Amino acid sequence: MVEKIASRRVERLSAVKGMNDILPPDSSRWEQFEGKVRLLMQRFAYENIRTPIVEPTALFMRSLGEVTDIVEKEMYSFEDRLNGEQLTLRPESTAGVVRAVVEHSLLYNGGKRLYYMGPMFRHERPQRGRYRQFHQVGAEALGFSGGEVDAELILMACALWKDIGLSEVALQINSLGQPKERNQHRQALIAHFERNIDVLDDEAKRRMHLNPLRLLDSKNPAMQEVIEAAPRLLDFLGDISRAHLETVTSILDANGVAYSINPRLVRGMDYYNLTVFEFVTTSLGSQGTICAGGRYDYLNEQIGGKPAPAVGWALGVERVLELLKEQGVASGGSVLDAYAVIPDVAALPKAMACIQQLRGAGVRVLMHASGPDGMASMKAQFKKADGSGARYALIFGDEEIRHGIVTVKALREGGVAQVTQILDNAAQWAESLQSNA
Ligand code: ATP
Ligand code: MG
């Protein structure tokens, strides 16, 4: 019996702003999506990696760049008051993956292809497609320098869109070249922004000399014209960088993948070089980027490891699922095979022994549970069974139990309307209850 807590009023607490509960039945869409991701990663031979959600703050300062949106204003950073450590809830996972790869010398005998999924944290203004806790699936290939691995990652994302039934995502690509080429471009960029200083907002003025590439990432409409007219990094690329981009695009061409070269695409972190790319849609308003990535050949060194090339992407799970909903892609269907109707608590031991056999054989069974007054009426239980979406009701009545049988009744069209089965042999008739059978 559940007793009521004395009449004290307890104040209700809610979730932190911008951080969502993912509830049934929506959570089943998440599980389906995650299942498809796992199968995809297996097909492409990417192995799972799980790193902590909390990392030393210095890791992100060093890797993402100090003059970036994330580090300047979006990180959940705090001091562990028990030992004074400076910590941050991860805003992304590439830095943590590289840290783990360096720490455990994962590249000692060649490259590694890794993937992860999990929550990320950024203190942004919550809106559709933009949350403070959100989820990413990411793939990282470390120790490979050839453009064919950039292409493999892009093809893998395209395969995922196909697996989940997503259409109308456009691929944009750019090359950020190598540090030397970027430096030359940087000088040209600063000169261009100095000529147009009147149009720049305060943030742009502050960042102009620190990190002028970041200005290209600005969403301020007043600055778009100046950004449009800025010198293009593509024009500063040398032969090797051009050839790398050519490797990637020729593989995409051979695979029939449509893309456009966007010379303004710079990405929000400093660690990228050569290939960068984004998958974009127009149907989620300004939160249109669902997946983004690129090459980061210098990050390993920056985090204290040996030099090792790398490339990867991350996709926003909330945005992908919202886009699927938008495009009306159906999901799921019933996940229940049978509903166990149990008229009397006395039948529970025998009934549950049978249900246990069924579940052991893979049948999905929801069992009616008793309330304070025992079991509900048959009528009430059948109503629940009908509403559950199950294909069959299993009736464990007194009469049945006495004869060692159970009545199996079809709740929906198709299948035999009503049969009896032997209680003890549940494993043998389990197959006939499974949906899609
Ligand atoms: P945006 O330009 O939309 O802020 P971003 O460049 O900051 O994106 P990345 O750091 O590249 O995003 O992260 C990869 C993906 O993660 C994004 O393309 C997006 O789908 C998703 N994402 C990023 N930030 C959020 C957020 N706050 N809420 C939900 N999804 C997000
Ligand atoms: Mg952002």
Image (spheres, grey):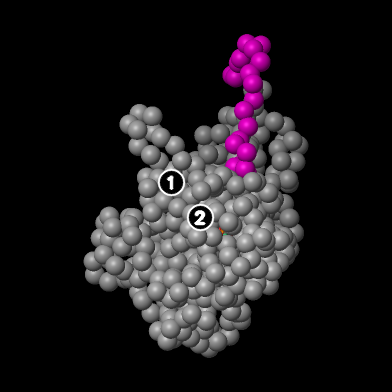
Question: Which percent across, then down, holds residue 262?
Answer: 60, 75
Asked whether residue 20 is drawn in magenta, I would say yes
- Give, as a three-letter code, the residue at label 1: Ile
**Earlier residue among tags 2 and 1:** 1
Quadrant of residue 5 within the rendered picture: top right
Disc 1 on helix, strand or loop?
loop
Residue tagged by mark 1? 53
Is residue 403 a member of the stretch shown in magenta?
A: no
Relative to the observer, which residue lies in front, 195 or 365?
195
Q: Quadrant of residue 297?
A: bottom left
Mark 1 nearby-residue class (10 Å; few <14, some 14–19, many ≥20): some
Q: Nearer the viewer, residue 350 or 201?
A: 201
328 displayed left or right of 91: right
Q: Position of residue 147 (x, y in %)?
A: 42, 80
The disc placed on residue 191 is none
Residue toward you, 170 or 179: 179
Q: Quadrant of the N terminus?
A: top right
Residue beneath the point at 37% across and 48% down: 58
Q: Return the x and y of residue 155 as percentages of the image width and height.
A: 51, 76
Distance from Cα at disc 2 to Cα at disc 1: 20 Å
Q: Which residue is mark 2?
A: 68
Q: Residue at x 59, y 42 (%)?
A: 19
- Type of the residue with mark 2: Thr
Specify whether residue 18 is in view.
yes
Ligand 1, by image quadrant, is bottom right
Q: Please name the residue shown 38% across and 79% down the image.
A: 146
The span shown in magenta is 1-23
Residue sitting nearer the eye, 220 or 191: 191
Tell me the mark number nearer the camera, choosing from 2 and 1: 2
